[in-house]
Image (spheres, rainbow, N blue to C red):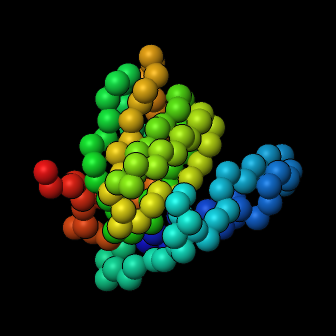
Amino acid sequence: MNKYFLTLILLAFLSLTARSQYSGLIIKELLRTDTTSIGQKMTYPKFSDPEVTMLKITIPPGKSTGWHKHNFPVFAYVIKGTLTVELEDHRVIKFKEDSTFAEMMNTYHNGKNMEDSDLEVIAIYLGGKGQKLSIMKEK
């Protein structure tokens, strides 16, 4: 079985219940959505060679990701701190510690750490081999 399929099975298993106990495990649903964080309907592109990438991203105080977009679904979990996301239309969305969200697709955005300590985020990219995880905005 490929990693993509196994990851989807794990995500489906984890989303079965908001909080339950099964054979001594405690399962807490972190996210269940059919839209992105800005209300876009979730879509899955078809890749001939799918690949899942999971990153732990640390953003120091005052730093940002730079303006970028994603062409496929990306899911994020804020481990520590508050992530401030600015959109091109000047909207600002804040994601606090222990929150999850589906990132916007095909929309340029900039993630910032406006706090005094490191921000830590786990990001899961449902992409394809050879595909860029993020497309940076040209200046």
Please tell me whether residue 12 is drawn above or below residue 26 in the rendered image. Answer: below
Q: How many marks?
A: 0
Q: Residue furthest front?
A: 90
Q: Give whichever of 93, 9 is nearer the camera.
A: 93
Residue at screen point 56% across, 53% down: 101
Residue 5 placement (x, y as % from top left): 50, 72
Residue at screen point 41% across, 30% down: 113
Q: Give whichever of 79, 41 is nearer the camera.
A: 41
86 on left or right of 65: right
Residue 41 placement (x, y as % from top left): 54, 74
Q: Residue furthest top?
A: 116
Q: Give whichever of 98, 4 is nearer the camera.
A: 98
Which image quadrant is residue 11 in?
A: bottom right
Residue 86 seen in render: yes
Residue 1 seen in render: no
Residue at screen point 65% across, 56% down: 31
Residue at screen point 52% across, 60% down: 38
Q: Give whichever of 126, 102 is nearer the camera.
A: 102
Residue 107 placement (x, y as % from top left): 36, 62
Residue 118 placement (x, y as % from top left): 43, 23
Please tell me whether residue 84 is drawn above or below residue 63 in the rendered image. Answer: below
128 on left or right of 18: left
134 on left or right of 86: left
